[in-house]
Amino acid sequence: MNSLLLLGAALLGSVMPSLVAQETSGSKSSDAKTADAKKDEAKKADPEPKWFAVVGGDVHTGTGGLLRGATVLAKDGVIESVGYSTDLPEGTEVLSARGLQVYPGLVAISASLAVSQGSRFLAEDDLHMRCCVDFGKNGHLHEGPLDAELDLLLADQAGLVDAQSDLRDAYDPFSSSLLMTLAVGITSAEQSGGALKLKRGEIDGVVMRERFLSSFTWTSASSGKTQLREKFAAAARYLREKREWDVRKDKVKDLPEPSKKGIEQKILSVLDGSARAKFNANDRDDLLGIARLAQEFGFRPVIEGCVEGWIVAEELGRAGAYAIVYPRQRRDKDENLVRAGGSSIENAAILHAHGVQVAIGPASNGIDLGGITGRDLLHLTVDADFAVRGGMTDAAALAGITTVPARILGIDHRVGTLEKGKDCDVIVTDGDVLHYETLVQYTVVAGKIAYDKQKELLFAHIRPRTPGDGKTSNSSGDSAPASAESQPPQR
Amino acid sequence: MVTRSCLSLLLLLAAGCASTPERASSSGLAAPGFKPRALRAGETGVALQCSKIFAMDEHDHIFAPGTVLVRNGKIEYVGPRRAAPAGYEVHAFEQGWALPGMVDLHSHVQGTFDINDMVLPINAELRASPAYVPGNTSLDRARAAGVTTLLGIPGSGTSISGFGVLHKTKDTPLYDTAVIADPGAMKVAQSYNPERSADFGSTRAGLGWLLREANERAIAANEAGVVDPRLENLQKVHARELPVLIHCAGSDGVGKAVNMWKGEYDTRCVVSHGCFDAFKIAPYVVRMQVPMNHGPRTIDFRVSREGRFVGTAGEYLEAGARDFSLNTDAPVVPQEELFLQGTVSARYGADSYSMLRGLTIHPARSIGLGDRLGSLEPGKDADIGVFNGDPIDPRTRCELVLIDGVVEYSRTRDGQLF
Amino acid sequence: MLLTTLLLSIPTPADPPLPSLYALRVGRAETIAHGTIEHAVVLIEAGKIVTVGQDLEVERGIPVIELPGATLLPGLVDCYSRLGLDSDGSSGFEPQAKASVELYPDQKIWAEILELGVTTLGLYPAGSGIPGQGFVVKPHGATREEMLLRDPSYLLVHMRSDPGSKKFLRDGLEKADDYDEKEKKNVEKWDKDQEKKGAKKDDKKEEKKEEAKSFDPSPPQDKAKKERKGYVPSEPDEKAKPFVELRQDKLRALCTLSKAADYLHLLDVLREETFEFDLRVFLRDDVDFHHVMDKFGEKKLRIAMDPRITLQPNTRRERSYAMELAAAGGKPVFVPRTDSINGLKDWLRHVGEVVGAGLDRQVALRAVTLEPAQLLGLGDRLGSLEPGKDANFVLYDGDPLEVSTRILAVILEGELVHGEIDQ
């Protein structure tokens, strides 16, 4: 199973080694700063390191290994070791996962803003306050009036929204949508092109990356395609000239600096690796066009949808593309076409087999509490299951909701697998994480238990955990909830 | 893959234990005195060699491994492994779980989707069959997922929207070869949709009167021994010749529906949807012995407001629902994802073996086809799906589908359609 | 003798319906400051409370109003209202705006408010973001000046979990930073100038003498201040001023929150700021303030809220945030559920419901009198029955929190402003 995954990675590595290197170095430098800042903060507040360990579970590291009955030890929220015969430092908070499965936290590549922002309320006095539910990026799941939108609009117009602090400043670490997201094992989520760590009860350190994915429109009209290509060409030319200028400026006196006029910063960011270009495309011809553009200008495109990708998987693989696939997306074949067309349940598997990095997205990116279930963000694993149905291995499908989305979002140095040095985002389940009856028992974010099934109302009544399998060493028992809120009601 | 399937199998068995399906029987199921014999000219025969067979019969037989023999479109043998007689087309699966073809009693994807004729509130003379387009892609995918029988019904825009057509999902352009019964069942919408804005029937009171008035006329015609051409089929409903499927939801709507169609009129009624907080009156539905055809909503969160994800299928089963089946209300849930209604219900607390019943024998029995469909028993239609594992695990693929003994889908032959 | 409200139609201070010095003898008095007193006597002189006690002897000659069946409560204080004001307000960043410009005395509503026992009203500026500063009135008086008790009362900050409202507060504090920075430079410059002057005059000795005369234990900073006699700080610009005043404790902030996360975002902006603030939280079903209740308690915050039992999100579980806040060490303040005359009519009944659900009665009574008075910065003058405080009373014919109880009379600064009193 994993050999295929490795093969895919190897293929990619050989095709464009320079780009891969560029990307990793680029992502590390910017995040190293925040990590350092975080450490400094921690030092100031609490010089004693905080130790946390998940002990005795079958640890699926996400790097190919399954360590039965192993220990994941974390120091200040970062994994210190994964393995056996670990000496736990004194004062370590221990979560027993005996008889349970341990996985890396899931990464949602496409998630409604409601996940991190909950419901929005107006900055208005009580008389005029009305609520607006699920103000999602895809639009219009309103239960209330459009005031929240208006509110944002006003703020935008006044130039009040600080782009760099959007996600953090709107984060709601108490919202029930956040809790539900954690309850299904999702610990990182894409939000507005950035990546958030879904911390509960705190807002510090939630933003892992802001606006890394940069959306590009790939139009079917040929003029639009030509224009986009010309813009990329201009940007590439500028970068070339700039490099040349950088080398020669000291030698040649008064050498004019190349003009940035008319160059799109967005494209420069994509070409220098500080952002990733994301296209939404499904048609075979569009996919081929994007692949060609990417190869010509040397960047790795992220293609969301990619419905007919299975037809041109080889080309996409060669272009080093990432695909965000919704396995249940259906599209009937155009009966006028002789060639293959339309959606295929095998899409994810075929793309993966051709070296495309496949992330799997939920059938809908919001949280659907209306009763029709199995097709929203809370059932991300079900969509991974459908990828397996189409021929993917379990391991590749799991990578599609952990490591691959982490790579796409530029956070793979922090999340996606259980390895030393990565964030301790761990889920503990009562079985195979891709099995439909498996429920998450604990979700750990940055070395803190953010969700405990028996302590929250949501799923506690479903196959209740028997005392003994899985508990924290400082708690007296699973059946004794800490607060009135956590106590499941009598049925 | 092997380890995964084993895990599923163990889980399934463990779950199944609660309802104690019989593990296996040495003799198998066949007509008395059955002896396998070679095909004669003009006859067809199919043998399925499977690693596991869910008979879904009264005794919950499971044969692992096992064989199904099909002769001339009907099942003749289900039981432990045995060799196929001469001339039989043999399909052998190393990992192959056989399940009766799935039955969905609430489907709208037969064709053109013009399912609500809104001018009149009572449309007992209408039929869904003219909108049926055999061989449309929704049906293709449904077939490829092991769904073999559908009750295609009009919508819920009016109180009585007409009669549905019971048909199989055969790959045929010919209407007649796929139809089991037309009219198949009457569709009633008790509340939550048929409310007519600014017209008579905008309230529950009005809706109730509309239904009662039509029913009383049909009953009067039956009693007078005459046939009212506009109520002919409704008269058959009251003569218990045709079943009726009632769209209703909420504990209020379901209560009303059961009370009227079973309590008052004693029709062959099936309650469909039963969503939101309707599970709270499950004991009443059970006591009145009305089959529940549940879906497309299978969890309740908001209405009960208890902060819990309540798996409603589990609640019905716990209340003792006997003929409990699941529906998609396709295209609300895509037709091919019928099994997923069982998947999520099992996830939220129902036992997985009961979900298999709810996808096969229970819907068949609810609509009056229990003697012909829904289980793998001698003499029944050979509608069979073979899967490479637990049929309600979305990871499982459907490998082969027989309808009336004909291979209507083969993954290896047709490519994986779903 | 019967003192009637006929006099009310001409409520001129020159013609008081009650004498300047008199005593009230009531069946029960809720002093707020010192619990309940049965058979209480309150002595009032010139609109102020002189003494409060049980069965006090009243000097001969002082008129005593006997109301053995009445319960006496300090006048109610509604600290978060817009009654009588009518502008749509501004939205955005208008910290300098004063709601008091909207005050218009000649309105019927003031009398209606007073009749419901509300003797003090904290009015806030309309609008979103940081819309301005509130003020306090007594709902009685012919002119603005007569009505006004305090202006400004608090700077209103609507804090929500969004970049916009956080930016407003950050901007305000940055303006205060800029001012502080500028002042620091001004002071340095002034010091230098003084030094130059001093060097010229060579009066260092004199200074030293003075220092020696009075030993000053205060830290050098304060000393520095003292030395800067004659220095006039510059005037901050109008938008910076309220924030400068917050830091100087000349103004308090009232921050409104709609959900628990808003509080974290408020703290996120305030960081090292040490100025005091109170909160106003809006309670609807599905609010989630229990997540930050311990943080509220830690700071012993005073929090204005609606007197209601709410449901925990997505459940039917009841929560009494007033009770939780009191238990955590904070100070609940009650604001009528709806900001209307009807809201005021139902106010104490709603408070009664929360008491019925378990809130301590004294805490509840305090939450409609002394705590809101504190929130408005008038705690030393209003809100309890203590010597020296304004003689603002409501007289009830029974338990004020009971549905059937009626108001007998309202007394404002010693004057009968509503009701009838048998003497």
Image: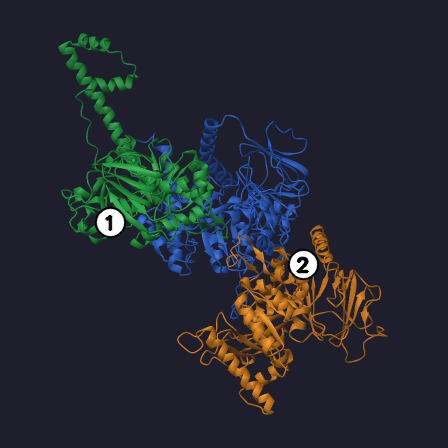
Chain depicted in orange: B
Nearer to the camera, B343 or C417? C417
- Which chain does the numbered disc 2 sit on? B
Colour chosen for chain A = blue
As helix, strand or loop, the secondary structure at mark 1 comes to strand
Q: Residue at x 63, y 61 (%)?
A: B342
Name the residue type under label 1.
His
* Residue at mark 1 to residue at mark 2: CA–CA distance: 72 Å
Q: Position of residue A114 (x, y in %)?
A: 45, 51
User: Mark 2 — residue?
Assistant: B352
Residue A89 vertical placement versus B201 (above, below): above
| Amino acid type, mark 2 | Ser
Question: Percent position (x, y) of residue A41?
Answer: 45, 30
Q: Residue at x 60, y 34 (%)?
A: A474
Between B346 and C253, the residue placed more toward the observer is C253
If the image is split into quadrants, where does the C terminus of chain B sit? bottom right
